[in-house]
Amino acid sequence: MENQTIKIGSKATLSVLCSSCKKEVPAGEFFSFKNNLKQDVYLCAGCREITAQKYSEEMANPNLIQAALLGGLAAVIAGYSWFWIVQASQWQCGYFSIGVGFLVGYAVHWGSGRKRGPSLQMMSAVLTFITLYVSNYFIVLQSLKNYYATHSSVLFAGGELAYVSPFHPVILRSVFSPIGLVIWGIGIYFAYQIPKHRNI
């Protein structure tokens, strides 16, 4: 939340009710904030201190192992779902990556004990990137298999698609399209922002 002490302007002579304790606070002694919905929130000095302490505690002792496990599980579910949705619909929707970012970010946040901080932000971003890359790798690989099923190719061994490296130029060109990277960036950004620490 953005914070400011109101001392001048149209509200300089107004008293307000503290949004937390509901106590009336005289003009010039309350703190004004904007919440996530851009609505005005007012706190007295005591409640501001309590809120600041609460936000500070949100960063203490996150359960990193549980965050990684729950985030990893969410990543597997999201990636697997994306793959099969594409196979069923034959339609590759890059915007699904935004949903992956949300799912992984919230899973890491909840798995950590609803904690926040840079380590959880990095974990969320990295897990989201890995999920997006691996999912797209298998989607492209399946597309190649479908294509070469009716064409002779060195990619086949015994009638089956041979191993193709995730870093093969064909894979890289298919996975990293300009618009795809932009959408990936949005998904990773959301994953990074969800467990971000809050200040007051």
Image (cartoon, rainbow, N blue to C red):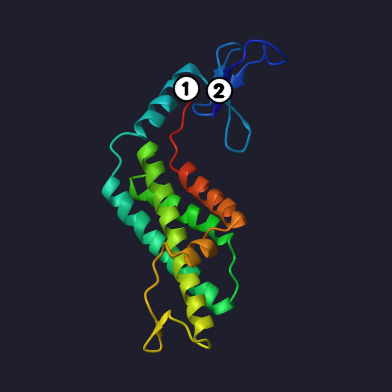
In this rendering, the answer to whether 195 lies above or below 23 is: below
Tell me where residue 163 appears, x and y as whole percent.
37, 74
Q: Disc 2 designates what residue?
A: 3
Numbered circles on residues, count: 2
Q: Residues within 10 Å of mark 2 (few under 14, many from 20)?
A: some
Q: Quadrant of residue 75?
A: bottom left
Q: Quadrant of residue 168?
A: bottom left
Of residue 111 and residue 52, the one placed in the foreground of this image is 111
| Secondary structure type for disc 1 | helix
| Secondary structure type for disc 2 | strand
Closer to the chain start, of discs 1 and 2, is 2
Mark 1 → mark 2, Cα distance in angstroms: 10 Å
Tell me where residue 191 appears, x and y as whole percent.
47, 48
Tell me where residue 14 appears, x and y as whole percent.
66, 15
In this rendering, the answer to whether 135 lies above or below 50 is: below
Which disc, if any, is residue 48?
Answer: 1
Q: Amino acid at mark 2?
A: Asn
- Circles 1 and 2: CB atoms closer than 8 Å: yes
Tell me where residue 193 appears, x and y as whole percent.
49, 42
Q: Is residue 151 left or right of residue 156?
A: right
Q: Amino acid at mark 1?
A: Arg
What residue is shown at x 36% (from left), y 89% (from top)?
A: 158
In this rendering, the answer to whether 63 lies above or below 34 is: below
